[in-house]
Amino acid sequence: MPRQYSPEFRQRALRLLDTMMEASDISEFEAIKSVAGKLGISEESVRRWRRKAQVDAGERPGTTSSEHAEIRRLKREVADLRRANEILKSASAFFRSGARPPRDEMIAFIDAHRGQFGVELMCRVLRAAIPGFLTSRGYRAARTRPPCDREIRDEQLIADLREVHRQNYSVYGVNKMHRAMKRKGWAVGREQTRRLMRKAGLRGVQRGKPVFTTITDPAAALPADLVNRQFKAPMPNRLWVADITFVRTWQGFCYTAFVTDAATKKIVGWAVAATMRTEDLPLQAFNHAVWQSNSNLSELVHHSDRGSQYLSLAYTDRLAELGIAPSVGSRGDSYDNALAEAVNASYKTELINRGKPWRCIDDVELSTAEWVAWYNQERLHEALGYVPPAEYEAALTGTSHPASKPTPALATD
């Protein structure tokens, strides 16, 4: 590491240099060499100090010391502004409500980012942008005091929130998490759930846009649309909707077909295959639904889009054999098969498109079986009053459905 010389030492070296050059007829080179030897420093140091002094005095072109200092100051200012901008971006969630963030959320944010930005800078920047944000002193005081009763209770609730979120494919947002916690027996409010989910870093997922998989057969006879976008039924087995979606695997595409009951939103039949061929995929899902229903289906309407699989002779003959009325919507209009599209979208969002690479069709089939069981038995549906399809079906038909065992309640905020 190069030695650091004080300004006084540098000035003395320059005075000696000027005196020597004025008192004797020697060159600058010889004077620099002499002064460097007398002071025990390198000639290059003396030469550099001499050039800088000449620039500062206007005797030589270049950037003066004051200009260098200003440039350094501006660079520091730009760096500070960039860091402040990064802090504000990281804290963007605090700006949505427009109110002072909860104390524990501010502390958690500082804890998470103190190594990146530093406590002093973070608190200074965020106090200027967010009214009531913690000071650095307030943060340190909060970290050293023992946790209060609310913080202890929050930690208990957060542990259960994480577990409930994990058990439900980590897809629930605030509304469903609030309902799920209440069903487990926890006395927790909706805003309390929101606060604790934010503190725990838990988020729900949002469904993407529908992707259409089936292909219309323009030569096929088209049954009438008996549903007219009214996906409601008074009882199970009165209206089923069907559709197909695709899944990418390392071995290529595979396809999943679902049949859903409009009254209960329950998936009553499904199948996974490497082809969309009628007999291998949609008919397998339909026959699965028929087998599971184990009832007279003469009052049933079967609704689908205009995909060639659903208009094929094999499929329509099977419907006719069971006395089921076929119904189709228009191709490319998701509203005409909205319930089936919603099931596909939930399947893709909650299971398929979660970042997991699908190795082969067997992996997809096993995971689909697990997801359908959860979807029917556990998943809360807003349209059903936040109960699972199986529970709603039991209430609708008067059959029994096992309820989950509640957990002892904690007091709310």
Image (tube, helix red, strand yellow):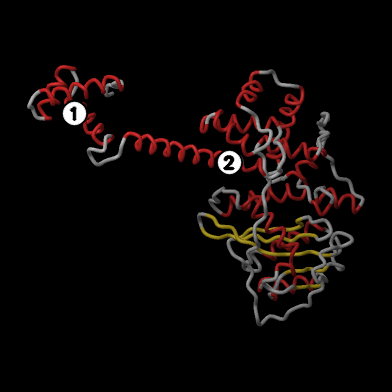
Residue under the point 54% across and 55% down:
249
* Of the pair 372 and 290, the residue shown nearer to us: 372
- Residue 271's place in the image compared with 318, above or below, is above
Depth order, front residue of 395/171: 171
Name which of mark 2 and mark 1 comes first in the sequence. Answer: 1
Residue 335, image quadrant:
bottom right
Q: Compared with residue 199, is residue 7 higher up or lower down, i.e. above or below?
A: above
Residue at (23, 34) in percent of width and height: 54
User: Is 308 above or below relative to 95?
Assistant: below
Residue at left offset 69%, top offset 18%: 146
Q: Viewer-nearest of labels 2 and 1?
A: 1
Residue designated by label 2: 88
Residue at the image position 87 percent from the left and 68 percent from the top: 299
Q: Which x, y percent locates residue 312?
A: 68, 75
Q: Is residue 352 left or right of residue 252?
A: right
- C-alpha gap between disc 2 and disc 1: 46 Å
Where residue 413 appears, as percent x and y from the top left, is 81, 31
Count all numbered tags in the image, as a single digit.
2
Disc 1 is placed on an element classified as helix
* Residue 85, picture quadrant: top right
Residue 61: image x %, image y %? Answer: 24, 41
Quadrant in which the N terminus is drawn: top left
Q: Secondary structure at mark 2?
A: helix
Q: Amino acid at mark 2?
A: Leu
- Badge 1 is on which residue? 44
Image coordinates of residue 159 in percent, x first then y, are: 70, 31
Between residue 87 and residue 65, name the one nearer to us.
65
Instruction: Estimate how packed mark 1 is, as few (under 14), some (14 to 19) or many (20 or more) residues with alpha carbons within 10 Å.
Output: few
Furthest-left residue in this view: 25
